[in-house]
Amino acid sequence: MRDMTPHERLNFLMSIPARTGKLASVRPDGRPHVTPIWYTVDGDDLIFTTWHEAVKAANLIHDNRVSLCVDDERPPFAYVIIEGKVDIQREPEPDRMLHWTMEIASRYMGADKAEQFGKRNAVEGEWLLRIKPTKIIARTGIAD
């Protein structure tokens, strides 16, 4: 096992086919909540969206600290864990929101469906979220 380089980490996070991230947040009563998300990377930050009435939205309003895990379940196995704080844009500018939703949709659904899925998710009530990392652990070759 070894640590990934920053370049390897970016390639892992942005691989195609895209892996989902498993986002952990804290419910207001202290219980953990984990949910899969689609995301993209912007510099060191991860970008994702959520519906304003989703459990994760309520959790992040209460406590914006998160942990995100992205892993490769195939030997020799690898993972990236990102801890950080989420910046929430509750009413993002429509063009900015569409840009990010189309970029995310392109990763997960393909370029031919990016506009369709991007427009579906760039609607009023959908929030734009940005994870600002405070700690990153990136390991590869777990079974080597």
Image (cartoon, rainbow, N blue to C red):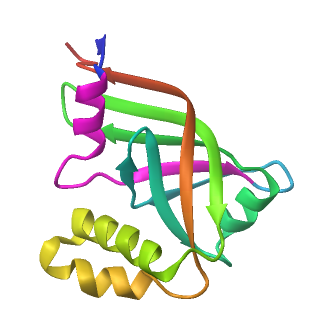
Q: Residue furthest right?
A: 29
Q: Residue furthest left?
A: 112
> What residue lies at 65% left-to-right and 61% top-to-bottom?
88
- For residue 52, say whether it is visible: yes
Q: Nearer the viewer, residue 40 or 95?
A: 95
Considering the image in quadrants, where does the N terminus appear? Answer: top left
Q: Is 48 displayed left or right of 58 in the figure? A: left
- Locate residue 33, reporting x and y percent: 65, 54
- Locate residue 62, reporting x and y percent: 81, 57
Considering the image in quadrants, where does the C terminus appear? Answer: top left
How many marks do you count on the picture?
0
Q: Is 124 displayed left or right of 52 in the figure? A: left
> What residue lies at 29% left-to-right and 51% top-to-bottom?
19
Residue 47 on the magenta span? no
Q: Is 12 displayed left or right of 45 in the figure? A: left
Q: Taking 76 as reference, is 2 above or below it? A: above
Residue 19 on the magenta span? yes
Q: Which residues are magenta?
A: 6-26
> What residue lies at 39% left-to-right and 41% top-to-bottom?
43
- Locate residue 58, reporting x and y percent: 74, 66
Q: Taking 100 as reference, is 140 above or below it? A: above
> What residue lies at 20% left-to-right and 46% top-to-bottom?
15
- Locate residue 65, reporting x and y percent: 69, 43
Residue 67, picture quadrant:
top right
Q: Nearer the viewer, residue 120 or 142?
A: 120
Q: Is 23 displayed left or right of 73 in the figure? A: right
Residue 135, picture quadrant:
top right
Q: Nearer the viewer, residue 56 or 75?
A: 56
- For residue 73, say whether it is visible: no
Q: Taking 49 as reference, is 7 above or below it? A: above
